[in-house]
Image: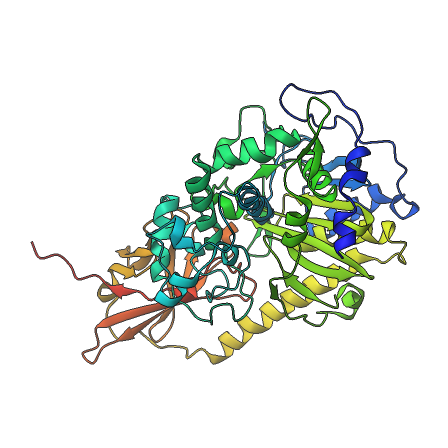
């Protein structure tokens, strides 16, 4: 695959179209190029409208890059439902939250600094952040910058995400400081387990070495050079007139509701960026050109050395390949899967894919590169069901790879139906196991008070109108009412139903019958893994004596 990546360098840079320029930066493409699209995309309009209907997606934006040219960049549907100020058609320039597609940009910034000789990916993290700590001292001592980008630290899936998901009031240094208390549940470099919090660490390393805030480094090193004029560091950096998409969630699996705007100001390196389909096309074009782009003066410029980009696209940690969830998706199952530096890696129909997905409350997306074919496609959506971006991505890949046409919409709809059926079965088992008619051992007032977890901090339980209320101290969105389930177990029903993250809350009592510990677990297996309630170990904070 070395040739597939490296040979695309100068040849694709030389083929970049000459476009209007803004002094100091490369200018964005104002309209798609003239290259003919393959016959397999002749029905793309109807296909995407079918995807929108099947998966209840208000709006979708798609961009395709082929052989150095942006051949498609446009939108379907609406930015927001209704007729309010945020409503209007999705366009190529409509900003979406790209969420974890940000990780590749964070990895790029670190590799730029390595190309400049200002750090090495083999540097220990504590060489740059002496105060950095993991829960295991041995991991702290050995953690390298490269390890921050590869999801093999020993943390469990999504560990520590509640420190910034949904939006919290902690700053990024405090998020990383609390990492020392997040439990390690696997071996260091032992296996793949996706995390976000270590990209917040990477963000701080970039700031330490570059000497500027992460937002400024991102702007000056990636957005400005590539002409990504609509890209923003985070939701709180959106500008008047940006007309960003509004995200939507299917609350309680029934009603499509807008997800309130959130910000990852304290973990932006993991998933903060907003960008349009056209912005992402310019990003893909430079990557497919081996890191090359044309500067404002017409000269060749580079984001990265070709060999550096090639190294980023090599597997660091393998990922087990799972069987297709439904027979209709057999053709999509890869032969290999792994993770490099901020990139997922797999294959499809004999071609290596370099890709990533992004998930945000109300918005999900996927960016996919086929380096040997000079092909890139990005799909941005303002709803939470990944089947939509998968179905569109696979249709585009098939069209350019001359594959038989497959009804990917139906295939991913079948997978979604199976997932929902599995969630229903899981709930039915909980109901069947429930001991009806039980009561708690103590009056509800005994459970009220402040409870504390070593890494998250305080969770408050209060007795209001005869019911327990829960409020996570740093997370305004995590407020809800506890409903008694059985014995010492409750279910917290969050006030904001778009979260789709109700959780069991189970108390343990000491020998005198006093509540001494509380544990939590998401009720549904479909709850986003970033609600890592299972890692909390809450204990009561003694009341202060006047």
The residue sitting at 62% across, 22% down in the picture is 24
Location of residue 112 in the rendering, given as x and y in whole percent from the top left corner: 57, 42
The residue sitting at 53% across, 58% down in the picture is 528
State which quadrant residue 445 falls in: bottom left
The relative height of residue 4 versus residue 349 in the rendered view (above or below) is above
Front in this rendered view, residue 271 or 239? 271
Res 228 seen here: no
Location of residue 5 in the rendering, given as x and y in whole percent from the top left corner: 75, 50
Scheme of image coloration: rainbow
The relative height of residue 269 versus residue 243 in the rendered view (above or below) is below
Front in this rendered view, residue 181 or 128? 128
The residue sitting at 37% across, 43% down in the picture is 171
Front in this rendered view, residue 46 or 251? 46
The relative height of residue 89 versus residue 6 in the rendered view (above or below) is above
Location of residue 530 in the rendering, given as x and y in whole percent from the top left corner: 49, 57
- 417 vs 496, left or right, is right
- 291 vs 396, left or right, is left
The residue sitting at 64% across, 66% down in the picture is 419
Res 350 seen here: yes
Location of residue 480 in the rendering, given as x and y in whole percent from the top left corner: 39, 54
Most extreme residue toward the left is 546
């Amino acid at each position: 695959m070395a040739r597939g990546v490296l040979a695309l360098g100068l040849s694709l840079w030389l083929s970049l179209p000459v476009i209007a320029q803004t002094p100091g930066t490369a200018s964005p493409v104002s309209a798609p190029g003239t290259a003919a699209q393959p016959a397999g995309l002749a029905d793309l309009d109807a296909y995407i409208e079918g995807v929108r209907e099947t998966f209840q997606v208000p709006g979708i934006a798609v961009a395709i890059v082929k052989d150095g040219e942006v051949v498609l960049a446009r939108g379907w549907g609406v930015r927001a439902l209704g007729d309010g100020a945020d409503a209007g058609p999705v366009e190529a320039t409509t900003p979406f939250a790209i969420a974890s597609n940000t990780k590749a940009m964070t990895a790029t910034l670190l590799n730029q600094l390595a190309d400049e000789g200002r750090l090495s990916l083999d540097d220990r993290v504590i060489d740059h952040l002496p105060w950095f700590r993991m829960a295991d001292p041995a991991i702290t001592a050995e953690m390298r910058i490269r390890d921050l980008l590869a999801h093999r630290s020993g943390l469990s899936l999504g560990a520590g995400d509640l420190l910034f998901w949904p939006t919290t009031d902690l700053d990024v240094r405090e998020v990383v400081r609390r990492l020392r208390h997040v439990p390690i549940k696997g071996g260091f470099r032992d296996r793949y387990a996706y995390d976000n919090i270590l990209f917040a660490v990477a963000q701080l390393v970039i700031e330490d070495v570059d000497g500027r805030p992460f937002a400024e480094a991102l702007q000056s090193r990636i957005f400005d050079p590539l002409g990504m004029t609509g890209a923003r560091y985070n939701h709180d950096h959106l500008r008047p007139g940006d007309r960003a998409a509004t995200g939507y969630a299917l609350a309680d699996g029934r009603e499509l509701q807008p997800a309130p705007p959130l910000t990852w100001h304290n973990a932006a390196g993991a998933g903060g960026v907003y960008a349009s389909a056209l912005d992402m096309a310019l990003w893909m074009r430079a990557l497919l050109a081996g890191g090359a782009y044309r500067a404002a003066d017409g000269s060749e410029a580079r984001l990265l050395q070709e060999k550096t980009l090639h190294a980023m696209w090599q597997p660091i940690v393998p990922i087990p390949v799972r069987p297709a969830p439904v027979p209709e998706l057999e053709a999509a199952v890869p032969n290999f899967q792994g993770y490099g530096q901020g990139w997922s890696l797999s294959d499809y129909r004999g071609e290596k894919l370099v890709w990533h997905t992004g998930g945000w409350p109300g918005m999900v997306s996927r960016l996919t590169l086929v380096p040997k074919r000079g092909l890139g496609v990005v799909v941005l959506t303002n709803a939470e069901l990944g089947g939509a971006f998968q179905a569109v991505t696979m249709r585009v890949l098939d069209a350019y790879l001359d594959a038989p046409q497959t009804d990917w919409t139906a295939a991913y709809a079948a997978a979604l139906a199976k997932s929902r059926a599995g969630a229903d079965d899981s709930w039915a088992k909980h109901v069947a196991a429930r001991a009806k008619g039980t009561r708690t051992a103590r009056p509800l007032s005994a459970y009220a008070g402040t409870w504390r977890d070593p890494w998250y901090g305080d969770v408050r339980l209060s007795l209001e109108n005869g019911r327990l209320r829960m409020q996570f101290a740093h997370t305004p969105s995590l407020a809800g009412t506890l409903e008694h389930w059985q014995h010492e177990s409750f279910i917290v029903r969050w006030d904001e139903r778009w979260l789709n993250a109700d959780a069991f809350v189970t108390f343990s009592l000491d020998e005198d019958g006093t509540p001494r510990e509380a544990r939590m677990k998401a009720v549904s297996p479909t709850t986003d893994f970033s609600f890592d309630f299972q890692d909390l170990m809450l204990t009561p904070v003694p009341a202060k004596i006047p």
